[in-house]
Image (spheres, rainbow, N blue to C red):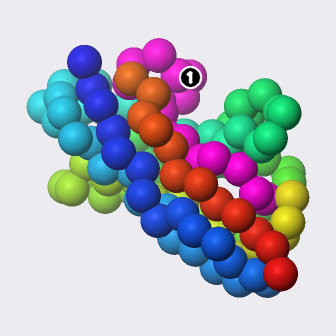
Amino acid sequence: QVQVVESGGGLVQPGGSLQLSCAVSRGGSIFTRLRLNMGWYRQGPGEQRELVAEVTSGETTNYADSVKGRFTISRDNAKNTVYLQMNSLKPEDTAVYYCNSHPPGWITWGQGTQVTVSS
């Protein structure tokens, strides 16, 4: 089973930036062999988990309308790591951010990383 660790969250003012990282902590050889499409998901207080960005094995990217033009997803296959660069952050981006395959199911959900956007 593949496991990941998300990091990079924190408290940031509106308009600020953060870069999240998702590193494979276990099952790296499986992850490499599967060549999974990967996604960043988020779950705000009282909300369902939603997909915000996807990067395919061929590095095609897709974004939710709410983050398009502000967030950039990328992957470094040599490091088994997926990134999410978040710019122009808004209070409504406050959530716990997770990474997983897209569709999810190939990777055990991690603890996520908290992003709080507040002045």
Residue 74 spot, x, y in % from top left: 47, 59
Q: Is residue 55 left or right of residue 118?
A: left
* 56 is higher (above) or lower (below) than 15: above
Residue designated by label 1? 103
Residue at 51% x, 70% y is 19
Question: Can you say which quadrant of the picture contains the N terminus?
Answer: top left
- Residue 59: percent from the left, percent from the top? 46, 50
Say which quarter of the image contains residue 15: bottom right
Identified at 25% across, 48% down, the residue is 80
Q: What percent of the width, then of the height, locates residue 75?
A: 39, 55
Quarter residue 70 falls in = bottom right
Q: Residues within 10 Å of mark 1 (few under 14, many from 20)?
A: few
Can the viewer see residue 107?
Answer: yes
Q: Give left or right: position of 57 versus 42.
A: left
Q: Residue at x 19, y 55 (%)?
A: 78
**Is residue 95 depicted above or below 100 in this figure?**
below
Residue 36 horizontal/vertical position (percent):
38, 31
Residue 105 falls inside the magenta stretch = yes
| Residues shaded magenta | 93-107
Q: Residue drawn at (30%, 31%), measured in percent from left and top?
A: 3
State the residue lying farthest toward the left: 29
Q: Amino acid at mark 1?
A: Pro
If the image is split into quadrants, where does the C terminus sit? bottom right
